[in-house]
Amino acid sequence: IWTTLYQIINRATIVMIKCDESSADLFDDPDMKDIIKGEALFLRSWCYYKLWNTWGTAPLITTRITDFANVKTPNSKETELLDQAITDLTLAVTLLPESWDAANSGRVFKGSAYGLLGKCLVFRACWNKQANATSAATDYTNAINAFNSITTRILVPNFSDNFDATKEN
């Protein structure tokens, strides 16, 4: 799992770098450059969330490693992984579309980023609530705002539908 998460982080970082280096006319749809960058930000933030939730600490890598001397990165401290995920998701919600057509069902969209952002904020607030109650309260409020920003989806009425492949997306 560790190796796979870091492969995704590395690939997402490369995609973001390539998007920043490329011109908008490279894409058929001028908005696609931002959408692809938003998807890469979402994937990288999901990986940081999974690393923090599983191990609590792991190396925080936000740049492409091009030199062998930079391979050994120290572990993050406290909520640095969540902090980066929150930063990435805050940018991703500005780049991702409101929704997708049926042919692109299952791709991340603005609501996906808001959902993961809210989750990361709640986890960070729970971590910080003893040391900094004011910061935790702000994170809880921001999480509620993120969850309330999801307007194009609803919960399924039957819980078992979450596990039914025919009801996917």
Image (cartoon, grey):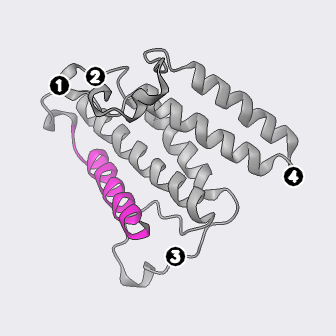
User: Few, some or many C-alpha atoms within 10 Å of disc 2 (few <14, some 14-19, many ≥20)?
Assistant: few
Which residue is label 1 attached to?
Answer: 103
Report, in whole angstroms, how far the alpha carbon at label 4 lies from the one at label 1: 47 Å
User: Quadrant where the N terminus lies?
Assistant: bottom left
User: Few, some or many C-alpha atoms within 10 Å of disc 1 (few <14, some 14-19, many ≥20)?
Assistant: few
Which residue is label 3 attached to?
Answer: 73
Residue at the image point whose x is 44% and y is 36% from the top:
92
SS state under label 4: loop
- Which comes before the other along the chain, label 2 or label 3? 3
Please tell me whether mark 4 or mark 3 is closer to you in this view.
4
Residue at the image point whose x is 44% and y is 29% from the top:
160
Report, in whole angstroms, how far the alpha carbon at label 2 lies from the one at label 3: 37 Å
Report, in whole angstroms, how far the alpha carbon at label 2 lies from the one at label 1: 8 Å
Asked if one can make out residue 33 in the rendered structure from this viewpoint, the answer is yes
SS state under label 3: loop
Which residue is label 2 attached to?
Answer: 100
SS state under label 2: loop
- Which comes before the other along the chain, label 4 or label 1? 1
Residues at discs 2 and 1 in contact (Cβ within 8 Å): yes
| Relative horizontal placement of residue 111, taking residue 33 as reference (left or right) | right
Asked if one can make out residue 94 in the rendered structure from this viewpoint, the answer is no
Which residue is label 4 attached to?
Answer: 131
Is residue 138 positioned above or below 3 on the image? above
Tell me residue 45's x, y (percent): 48, 48
Residue at the image point whose x is 26% and y is 36% from the top:
33
SS state under label 1: helix
Over which residues does the magenta segment extend?
A: 2-23
The kind of residue tagged 1 is Ala
Examine the structure image and report whether residue 152 is included in the region drawn in magenta.
Answer: no
